[in-house]
Amino acid sequence: MSVRSDLSETDRSEILAPIPRRHHILQTTESRRWLGTPPLSQYSPPASPLSAATTPPAPNRLTGRLSVNSLAGSDARRSSISQSHSGQVAHKDDEARRTREGWRSDGWVRVILWERTPCSVTTKLKDTGWELTIHLPVLQWYTYDLQYWGLDYPPLTAYISWLCGIVGSWIDPSWFALDKSRGIETPGSKVYMRSSVLALDTLIYVPALLMFTRTWQGTRSVRTQNIALIILLLQPALLLIDFGHFQYNSVMLGLTLFAMNLFATGHDLLGAICFVLSLGFKQMALYYAPAVGSYLLGKCLYLGPAEGSRLFIRLAMVTIATFVLMFLPFLPPFAPLWAIYDPIARIFPFNRGLFEDKVANFWCATNVVLKWRLWASQGVLVKLSTALTALGFLPSVAGLLHAGYKLQLEPGNTTPRKNMTPTPLLPLLPYALLTSSLSFFLFSFQVHEKAILLPLLPATLLLSSAAPEQSTFELGMLFSNVAVFSMWPLLKRDGLGVQYFASVLWNRLIGYNPFTSKPTTLLRWLSLAIYSACAALHLLELLVAPPARFPDLFPVLNVLVSTPVFVLTWLWSIKRGVEVGWALGGLGTRADKAAKPSSSAPGPNDALQVPVQDGRGIARSTGCVR
């Protein structure tokens, strides 16, 4: 999530940010002519000791772009220089030849690493959080020097930042010196930052994945469970953002997954606590709130008036108590009542605009034709985005509530109450999470491209349970690959080009290659077309500079390629939710229930394998047993 504030132009010029550094491979060849780039900012030193006269900038080409014309021009200049010095000694000719060979090899390094791409200062956001939390009182965490990088995550993130800062200060206090450590980027600090991500993954995310495979897929073979675990562990989008861009999204996702696992085993109160902790770690977990809330409310309806009311009261008490404990330092008697406004104002920044950068959602894609900020005020856009978001997740909410009401237990049936049996609503939960999170990503206010990680979690959970010949697997792979592609502008700014292209190997690891067999379905044809468009756009971006009038041409094209896939996945999740609800008997009226024999609720192992009737009358499963 971005930490930009609504500042005037004067204020923006006073913001100090860390000076980006080059990749160490490229630093070793700074003396070469093709590295004679201008400074990245007025405060940064020149990238090369060569003077401006020796490396005149091309007026109609971006300095950071490698093109065929630039290579040909450089070869021509080198050839002319060689001819003018034909009388020099042979050892200098050999030296020039070695220089040309080195230039060509480094040119390939430049192609791979997308050289001259400055690192994003967003990677220092958490370091600033550590600095603030260990040196300042709690009441100043959300108000101190907001023109630099201010804390804008819920309190649980701040508490973990405080813990990381305390541990890191034992290693090197200079990493966390107040104000003085801004922009620090030593090898030791970077190792510590990445190590903290790995430590939290080990403590929260990996156990949640293990519990998922053992709980939701417990009836399958150990090999199948391990395959699902590998698919989930090596999800490329999450690895690139958390370990490359440096964030703790896996903590939020792990807590949400723990909530799902606890719901599947009937521990609703513990599951509610885990989900509130997820909300307390990152406010983006609100993307899941409609689905989780509807599932719990649907279970209250399923249990009947007496037991359902008791569960509802317990859930409400647990939720309120968990929130109060997290925000306790900002509440009386520990702080004035108005102090609670500071974290809330930072957590929900409605003054930042409709969308952040070029994110592949409805607003940014349609903004190419309809300039929303010119047609409507910010207040109107907030209301419009809220209405569209609510309409987007309404089908999943209605499906869960209606299924809970229709499948309501008879008054004398107490089996689910005694044995903590999960409700028959459980198979609807992954699809509801996907629908809800995608509706927020596509239609809500102020979305960042990293928010695609939230719908990726339920999509990958469903993908890990599907057979390769199923549409769930094909669409899940398309959605996952395009999600990584949609974050390319962000990853490019962070210098993660090599890692980005290496993430393609994830497809090979799980046995997916859409180009090996003849396409037989419309979805496979669509996948091939999308992948071809992604490859063509990458090649075009590498070889051609955007026109001066449209400097954001390639990010916008990225949005126009990615958004239709996300919309298609959102519509598919709604369709699958309706199909699963129909298979569970969750459609129709309660009067229909009396005509059907009662059946026991599916356990968590069956939640991803609910049989669904297709158009030919053949029962097919949402999952498979490998």
Image (cartoon, rainbow, N blue to C red):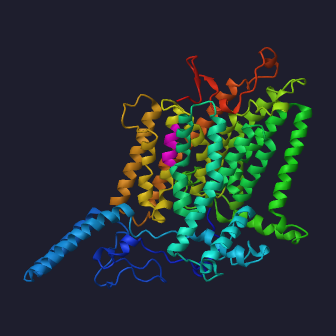
Q: Residue at x 53, y 68 (%)?
A: 191
How many numbered circles are shown? 0
Between 381 and 430, the one nearer to me in the picture: 430
The answer to whether one can see residue 119 in this image is yes
Q: Residue at x 37, y 69 (%)?
A: 62
Is residue 477 found inside the magenta-colored segment of the image? Answer: yes
Which segment did they paint magenta?
Answer: 475-483
The spot of residue 371 in percent (x, y) is 57, 57
182 vs 287, left or right, is: left
Between 151 and 51, the one nearer to me in the picture: 151
Between 167 and 93, the one nearer to me in the picture: 167
Between 71 and 328, the one nearer to me in the picture: 328
The spot of residue 428 in percent (x, y) is 69, 34
Is residue 222 found inside the magenta-colored segment of the image? Answer: no
Q: Residue at x 74, y 45 (%)?
A: 290
The answer to whether one can see residue 63 in this image is no
The spot of residue 199 in percent (x, y) is 61, 60
The spot of residue 576 in percent (x, y) is 62, 32
> Image height check: is 203 above or below 117?
above
Where residue 379 sits, quadrant-wise, is bottom right
410 vs 157, left or right, is: right
**Chief secondary structure of the magenta portion:** helix
> Image height check: is 167 above or below 552?
below
